[in-house]
Image: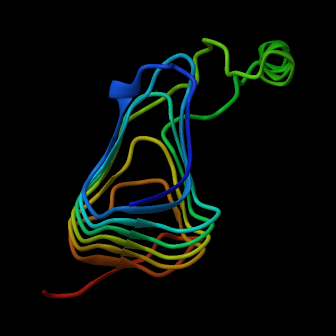
C-alpha cells in the first residue's frame, strides 16, 4: 500500500478504513466535526484527488479513481456569510474545520467503478456497481449500476450491458 496524505482532524483512527492492496496517491480528510471514509480492496486513488468527509464516504472494491477527482459529502463551508467568515478564521488560524453544519450526506460508490480525471462527486449520491464516470463529469444525482456518464453538463447516462 502506498499512502500519500491522510488527514484525520477528528483524531479517531477508527473513522478511516483502507482495504488490502489499495494504492492511495491522493488525499483523504475527515473533518473535525466527524465523518468516515471506507475504501475497499484493490482500489486506486490518483494524484491530486481529494476525498473529504463530514458524514460518510464508502468506496467499494476494485474502484479506480483517476487524478484530480473531488469527492465531498458536504458543502465545505457554511452558507451564511458571517458563519463562513468565522469558519475561514477557524481553519486558517486554528488549522481545523470547526463544528459547523456542512449539510453532509453520505456518498456510496459501488464495486468496480471507474471515475475519470477531474470528475466531481457531490454529497448524497450513490454510484452503482460497474458504473463509469467520464472525465470532467459532475455527479449530483444517483448513477445506476453499469451506466456510463459521459456529459458533464447534463449528466447524460448511457447504459451498457455486462
Coordinates of residue 47 in the picture (x, y in percent): 60, 67
Residue occupying the point 48% across, 54% down: 140
59 or 3, nearer to the observer: 3
Q: Is residue 22 above or below residue 32?
A: below
State the residue lying farthest toward the bottom: 161
The part of the image, by quadrant, that contains residue 109 is bottom left
81 or 114, nearer to the observer: 114
Coordinates of residue 90 in the picture (x, y in percent): 79, 15
Q: Is residue 69 above or below residue 6?
A: below
Residue occupying the point 58% across, 16% down: 101
Residue occupying the point 20% across, 66% down: 129
Residue occupying the point 83% across, 23% down: 88
Looking at the image, residue 143 sits to the left or right of residue 137; the answer is left
157 or 94, nearer to the observer: 94
Coordinates of residue 98 in the picture (x, y in percent): 67, 14
Q: Is residue 69 above or below residue 106?
A: below
Q: What's the image's color scheme?
A: rainbow
State the residue lying farthest toward the front: 1
The part of the image, by quadrant, that contains residue 114 is bottom left
Q: How many marks?
A: 0
Looking at the image, residue 57 sits to the left or right of residue 70; the answer is left
On the rendered image, what quadrant is the N terminus found in? bottom left
On the rendered image, what quadrant is the C terminus found in? bottom left
140 or 37, nearer to the observer: 37
Coordinates of residue 125 in the picture (x, y in percent): 37, 48
Amino acid at each position: 500500500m502506498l499512502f500519500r496524505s491522510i488527514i484525520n482532524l477528528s483524531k479517531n483512527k477508527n473513522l478511516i478504513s483502507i482495504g488490502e492492496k489499495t494504492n492511495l496517491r491522493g488525499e483523504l480528510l475527515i473533518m473535525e466535526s466527524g465523518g468516515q471514509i471506507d475504501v475497499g480492496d484493490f482500489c486506486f486513488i490518483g494524484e491530486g484527488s481529494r476525498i473529504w468527509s463530514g458524514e460518510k464516504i464508502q468506496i467499494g472494491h476494485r474502484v479506480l479513481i483517476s487524478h484530480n477527482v473531488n469527492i465531498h459529502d458536504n458543502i465545505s463551508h457554511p452558507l451564511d456569510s458571517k458563519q463562513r467568515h468565522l469558519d475561514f478564521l477557524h481553519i486558517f488560524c486554528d488549522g481545523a474545520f470547526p463544528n459547523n453544519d456542512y449539510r453532509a450526506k453520505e456518498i456510496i460508490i459501488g464495486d468496480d467503478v471507474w471515475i475519470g480525471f477531474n470528475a466531481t462527486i457531490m454529497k448524497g449520491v450513490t454510484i452503482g456497481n460497474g458504473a463509469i464516470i467520464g472525465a470532467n463529469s459532475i455527479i449530483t444525482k444517483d448513477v445506476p449500476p453499469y451506466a456510463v456518464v459521459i456529459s458533464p453538463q447534463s449528466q447524460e447516462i448511457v447504459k451498457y450491458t455486462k
